[in-house]
Amino acid sequence: SKTLPAAAGRDRALELLLTARIIDAREAAEIGAVSAVVDDALAEALRLAAEVVRAPARTIRSVKRTLRLAATADFDRAVEEIEAQAQ
């Protein structure tokens, strides 16, 4: 996975993946593997969804496209793609 090493660092990600050690929510938050630890996951998901739905659809599409590009392309290519889509 690209996400875990980016969040936790290569060494920590390697340790977790090779040992298959289960971590608790507190540790996941400490290493950046989750964005938040909450008591009521459903309530928090609904709160976030309500916030996102207020944003313009064009903005949401643009952010999602940019994140996909950033995850799969080198920086220069991502900038070229974003600039091309903006025109």
Image (cartoon, rainbow, N blue to C red):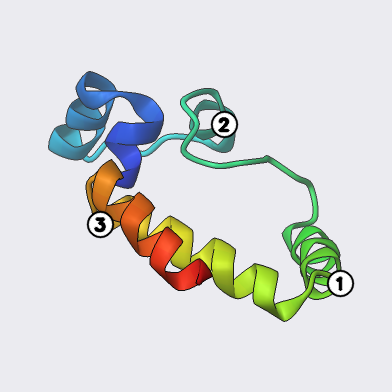
In this figure, what is the number of numbered marks? 3
As helix, strand or loop, the secondary structure at mark 1 comes to loop
Rendered residue at 44%/60% (across/down): 83
As helix, strand or loop, the secondary structure at mark 3 comes to helix
* Kind of residue indicated by mark 1: Arg
Above or below: residue 16 compared with residue 81: above
Residue 82: which disc? none
Image spot of residue 21 (x, y percent)? 28, 35
Cα gap from disc 2 to disc 1, whole angstroms: 27 Å
Q: Is residue 33 left or right of residue 56?
A: left
> Which residue sits furthest left?
18
> Considering only order in the chain, which callout, 2 or 3, is on the residue closer to the N terminus?
2
Above or below: residue 63 compared with residue 76: below
Report the front residue among 71 and 81: 81
* Kind of residue indicated by mark 3: Thr
Rendered residue at 56%/68% (across/down): 62
Q: Residues within 10 Å of mark 2 (few under 14, many from 20)?
A: some
Q: Residues within 10 Å of mark 3 (few under 14, many from 20)?
A: few
Cα gap from disc 3 to disc 2, whole angstroms: 25 Å
Residue 72: which disc? 3
**Circles 1 and 3: CB distance less than 8 Å?**
no
* Kind of residue indicated by mark 2: Ala
Rendered residue at 80%/69% (across/down): 55
Residue ID for mark 1:
54
Residue 29: which disc? 2
Report the front residue among 15 and 68: 68
Q: Is residue 3 left or right of residue 56?
A: left
